[in-house]
Amino acid sequence: MSDPYAAAPEDRFSFGLWTVGHRGGDPFGLPTRPPVEPETIVERLAEVGAWGVSLHDDDLVPFGSSPAERDRIVARFGEAVRGAGLCVPMTTVDLFRQPVFKDGALTAADPAVRRFALRKAVAAIDIGAELGAGIFVLWGGREGVESGAARDPRVALERYREGVDFLCEYVRSQGLATRIALEAKPNEPRAHIYLPTTGHMLHFIETLAHPEMLGVNPEMAHESMAGLSFSQSVGQALWAGKLFHVDLNSQNGPRFDQDFRFGAEDLKEAFLTVRLLERSGYDGPRHFDARAYRSEDDIDVYAAFARGCIRNYKILAAKAAAFDTNEAIQAACDKAGAAQLSEPTPGFSPEVLEAIRDEDFTALLANTEGRHHEAADQLMIEHILGI
Ligand SMILES: [Mn+2]
């Protein structure tokens, strides 16, 4: 019998080179796994059923490579990706690792650092274009502060706006179809990062010169670090038509960014997120920005970790479909207001206002009936648990 939870290309599952390629190093410990060539990672991802592989510029082309080396590396990688039947749906730029970015990149006080960041980002967009990536993710990991004493956030945001506008103009000048997805994170590596949540990003986009080119890449761990509901963040991005990409992983509450296997923590939020993505018709990459525990070896990384991300998504998608077609569950959800919320609120007119002023709310104010969320939630829990 075939495995109902095996990945299919239409699932659009993708992994970053930096995820399965993560060597297990952390701020307190050395790497525990050997380095693996990008071409080998691609072969192994194909074996677990991935559809795509994403990358930072420096994951593939070592920082400081010559133009000739860069061309050779990108061409060889593109061949490996095509040979394995994969694609590169997304590339991103590392504007955080090198010491030059110690006080920011696009928001660095030193204008020369900002110009260098633009040069690096433009080169990363070029790598993406060469590999056929339609999406460029921008995560400003160093765009923030430890201390606000010498920083006016209004001025920093103005520099941020100019930097992103520059990149959009570059994409347009090259006639590329690249769309840019902004990724938020509240802290780590900076104490306070500018535009710390997906909601902040969604507003920022509306201040830019070409908002139609920009969307968001919400990451489950990042929103959870701020104590927020990931499914609500994804929901706002979908509602705004701005969900260009999504970083699936898991996180155990507000603490350092854990990037655990998707589904490993907070099953309820994982379920609600998968249900939302599947119901929304989202057809972008289902990208796992996660990494295996430091305790694991390179076989565990693929056999248990990468397969686990995929299986948990597929299992939750099947659970979500069954949830939405179960009559008893749907009746309980409707009793808790699921269908009622679909009824629009009236638009303003003097007549409508007058009618509202005249409406008799006596029975509403006297109504003590509960809203029955406990019953709906309990059914969801039992459904997830397989009862
Ligand atoms: Mn993360």
Image (spheres, helix red, strand yellow):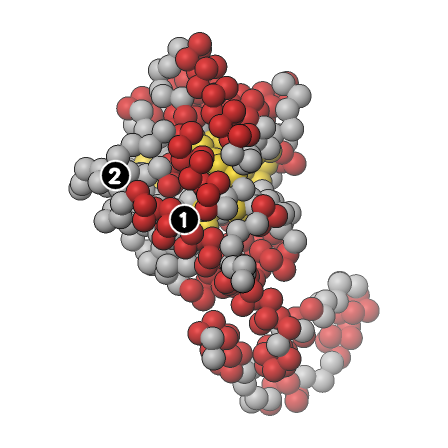
In this rendering, the answer to whether 106 lies above or below 329 is above
Q: Residue at x 54, y 85 (%)?
A: 370
Most foreground residue, 301 or 150: 301
Which mark is on residue 33?
A: 2
- Whichever of callouts 2 and 1 sits on the residue coming sooner in the sequence is 2
Most foreground residue, 60 or 246: 60
Q: Amino acid at mark 1?
A: Ala
Most foreground residue, 275 or 38: 38
Q: Residue at x 50, y 44 (%)?
A: 50
Q: Secondary structure at mark 2?
A: loop
Q: Is residue 85 visible?
A: yes
Residue under label 1: 306
Q: Is residue 152 visible?
A: no
Q: Residue at x 53, y 21 (%)?
A: 126
Left or right placement of residue 283 versus residue 48 in this view = right
Q: Residue at x 60, y 23 (%)?
A: 171
Q: Residues within 10 Å of mark 2 (few under 14, many from 20)?
A: some
Residue 160, position as x, y percentages in the image: 47, 30
Q: Amino acid at mark 2?
A: Arg
Residue 112, position as x, y percentages in the image: 39, 15
Left or right placement of residue 230 versus residue 285 in this view = left
In this rendering, the answer to whether 336 lies above or below 316 is below
